[in-house]
Amino acid sequence: MSPSPRARRLSLAAVPVAAAALAAPLPGTAPASAAPAPAEASVADYAALGDSFTSGVGIPDQVDAECGRSDRNYPTLVSADLSPDAFTDLSCGGATTEHMTEPQGSNPPQFDALKESTDLVTLQVGGNDMGFADIVTRCAVLGVFDPNGQPCKDSFTSGDSDELQERIEETAPKIDGVLEGIAERSPDARVLLLGYPVIMPDDGSNCHGTVPIAAGDAPWLRDTQKSLNDMLAERAQAHGAEYVDTYTGSVGHDLCQPEDVRWMEPLDAVDAAPVHPNAAGHEAMAGAVLDTASTAPAGRV
């Protein structure tokens, strides 16, 4: 996902963390053994792959202008918490699954970040394979002229087919290929595949004065995004990777919300590129990654 960098401001998002309570022993009884604390994630070599939802387009400070990579994107925040011995972030705005093995401008193939010793990989890709930027542009333009209808849905669902659902189905084997490529290059890595956080309101409403998405298109676009996330979750499970749900926790922080509430920027972006996560959104995604990383996956001890 790819628009040009804009904006400034870092707002911190609180990420809820569960705490365990210890019960005091009864008088005259031996103290009960305390439950073991959750194991700290120990990471030696962390590689971050992804598109502009990963790179942090428009969030200061931009450390790679061509890729729109920020030093406050969620991979950098995750690395700061886990303190791995090695950290490589090759995420880049506009990246598709092809850019895992092909260069993107001066950015090398993102798989160059992978080594045999890599033991943690985060991946967030697929939106650009569907044509995210073109979808947003088409829906916004059509919504200007028919604010109460569903002109964008109608343009993508002529006949008996839904072109965007077909694109999701066509993207699935590409995600398979990426996950297989990671496993080949970093066979011992724990792979966390992130979904995409909420963009439009989860209740299906719109904010036409902020982003000119028609009233009838808003719930359809929401459902399309959920379908994309469902596909990503299914592909992760099929390949022994772990899906990180960034959508559920971001509900209520969509681009229609006030500046101090939203984690996703509208077209007149203040804190990041338009229709992209801002700094608070990256804080939240980092929290979701760390919550997953702190839990031992099935089959591991």
Image (cartoon, rainbow, N blue to C red):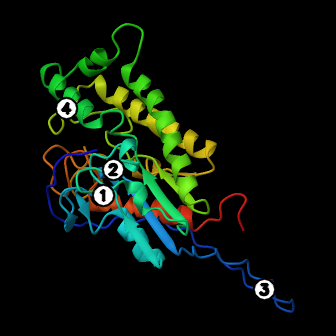
Residue at the disc numbered 2: 51
* Contact? badges 2 and 4 (CB < 8 Å): no
Dot 3 or dot 2: first in sequence order is: 3
Residue 92, horizontal then vertical, whole percent = 29, 54
Residue 26 figure quarter: bottom right
Label for residue 25?
Answer: 3
- Foreground: 77 or 248? 77
Quadrant assignment, res 89:
bottom left
Disc 4 marks which residue? Answer: 137
Q: Quadrant of residue 223?
A: top left
SS at mark 3? loop
For the point 52% across and 53% down, the residue is 182
Q: Dividing the image into 4 quarters, which one contains the N terminus? A: top left
Three-letter amino acid code at disc 4? Thr
Q: CA distance from mark 3 to mark 1?
A: 49 Å
Q: Residue at x 15, y 26 (%)?
A: 141
Q: Position of residue 291 (x, y in %)?
A: 53, 64
Using the image, determine if residue 289 lies above or below residue 129: below
The reply, left or right, for residue 159 in relation to residue 294 is left
Query: Is 122 on the left-hand or right-hand side of 296?
Result: left
Determine the CA span between mark 1 and mark 2.
6 Å
CB of mark 4 within 8 Å of CB of mark 1? no
Element type where label 1 sits in the image: helix
Residue 60 pos. (x, y %) = 19, 66
Task: Compute the Cα span from label 4 to label 3.
Answer: 62 Å
